Every structure is written in structure tokens, then in C-alpha cells.
Image (cartoon, rainbow, N blue to C red):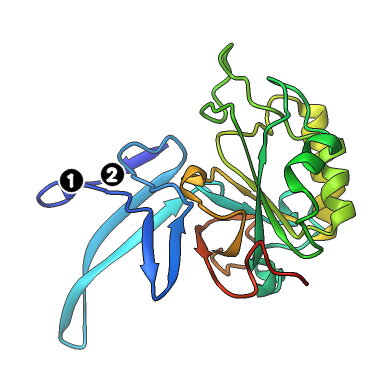
Amino acid sequence: MCVNNKKRKGEIKLKNKAIGQVGPYRIVSLSKIIDPATEKRRCVVRRHKKSALGVTDYHSDIDIASHLGTHLEAPYHLRDDLKDIAGLSPDRFIGRCVLLRLATCQPRALITRKDLDAADGGVVRSDDIVLLDSRFHHEPFTPGPDDQRPQLSRESAEWFRDHGVKSVGFGDGIAIENNPEECVAFHDILMPRDVTFIEVLQNLDQLSHKVFLLVCLPLPIRGLDASPVHVVAIEGVPGFMTDEKG
């Protein structure tokens, strides 16, 4: 469901300026720009005037799905007894990130330890965030014969568990929805360990480094199983680079 209660004055165009620079560091936005006019999931924005203490300005009421756009899923997504978004410590949302481009995966195949080892090359450490991509791309949750994306699996979840990864993210190059049994296993193995998932990432092709600092901050609202996030990669930060040992 998506409602845009009124057109914005002058039909302001939404532009995704994904690349930026802060001092010597290159910044890449990895989040989808959400437009209420075209979004298929629940996304309602109501803009209204508000007066207080002699000042009149604008406020917005928002009514959105927790899994809207680029979003982070907390363990609470799996079970009531696991942590919600507000129950996770802030260090779960920031950290060293490794991008694994899975070159050995076959079309529609389950991702294996061998695939992950080949892409990793010994770079992934405990407490890392890992983002996945492949050479196959397809709009998520739109099944069809053209969908050749490799699929997350029990075996891949075990690899992430064994490496002590704290978050796993992916965009349109990886499928989680095409094999329910493997999808359930992926959740069951990782979420009880406070591993979060970052879904619907974009602009992974704009990243120029394999290792970088990632910031991915959800809304700190109690009771949320997931939250839209603005995911930002910061490249070139000392301590968060491929050629550094630790």
C-alpha cells in the first residue's frame, strides 16, 4: 500500500546522489531512495502545518512497513524471545565491512562454503559485516524464469556463524526468498546469535574497495522487528582497509 496524499509543490524530483566525499574519505550510499508515489510496500506520508509558540512550520506523519526499502532485520523478526531493534547495542550497526563478490556461484544454485571461501580469500574476521553480490541480478520478490540469482542457504549460514560475522547484507544479486527451507535455516542459524540482515541494498557496483567502514543505523523504536536504514560505506578509513593486518 502506498499513498502520497498530495503532490509536492513544483514536483520536486528525487535524485539518488549515491557518491560523496568527506575529507579524504569516499562515501557511497547503499540504500534505496523511497518514493511514496511508487513504493509497493506500505508507505504513507502526510504533511501538515503545525503552530506552536507563535511559530508555524511543517511536520509529517509517516505510516510505513518495517521492511520498507533498504532495511535491517533484527532477531525479533524470527522469534518473540529474541532482541528487537532497540535491544541491540549500537556496535551491531557500525563496523568493518567486507564485500564478497561471488564469482563461482552457478545460476540459481545454493551458496556454498566453497563459493564464500573463494570470494573471501581469508579477509573476513570475527565481528565483521559482510555484504554479498554476484554476477546475476534480478528484482527481489518478483519470481520469474529470468531470475538466476544464487541463493542463501544453510551452508552459507554456517559459514557466517563459524566466522563470527555480526551482519549479512545483500541487494538484487542474491536471493533469500526462492527456497523456503533454506531461507528458514538461514534465519534459524544466525538470528539467535544476534546476527542481523540488511536487505535491498543498492549501488554495490559503485564500491571501489573490498573492505571499508559501514554505518547502518535503524530507528531506535522498541518492539520493531526491522527498520528502514540509510546504509553508508566509508572508503579509505585507516583500520578499515584491505591491506591492513589485524
Residue 21 is marked as none
The residue that mark 1 highlights is 7
Rendered-image quadrant of the C terminus: bottom right
Which residue does the image show at 17% across and 50% down from the upper left?
12
Place of residue 244 in the rendered image (x, y in percent of width and height, measured from the top left): 69, 69
Helix, strand or loop at mark 2: strand
Q: Is residue 235 left or right of residue 177?
A: left
Which residue does the image show at 39% across and 76% down from the upper left?
23
Helix, strand or loop at mark 1: loop
Q: What whole-number distance in Å separates the C-alpha atoms at marks 2 and 1?
A: 7 Å
Rendered-image quadrant of the N terminus: top left
- Foreground residue, 116 or 2? 116
Which residue does the image show at 19% across and 73% down from the upper left?
57
Q: Is residue 151 left or right of residue 69?
A: right
Vertical order, 134 against 202 (above or below) = above
Furthest residue toward front: 243
Which residue does the image show at 65% across and 60% down from the upper left?
97
Q: Is residue 170 left or right of residue 81?
A: left
- Foreground residue, 94 or 42? 94
- 2 and 1 marks in contact (CB < 8 Å): yes
Residue 4 is marked as 2
Q: Is residue 82 left or right of residue 39?
A: right
Within 10 Å of the Cα at label 2, are there few (<14), some (14-19), or many (20+) other Cα atoms? some
- Foreground residue, 196 or 224? 196
Name the residue type under label 2.
Asn
Name the residue type under label 1.
Lys
Count of number-bearing discs: 2
Question: Based on the displayed image, in which of its 4 quarters is residue 243 positioned?
Answer: bottom right
Place of residue 94 in the rendered image (x, y in percent of width and height, measured from the top left): 62, 69
Furthest residue toward bottom: 53
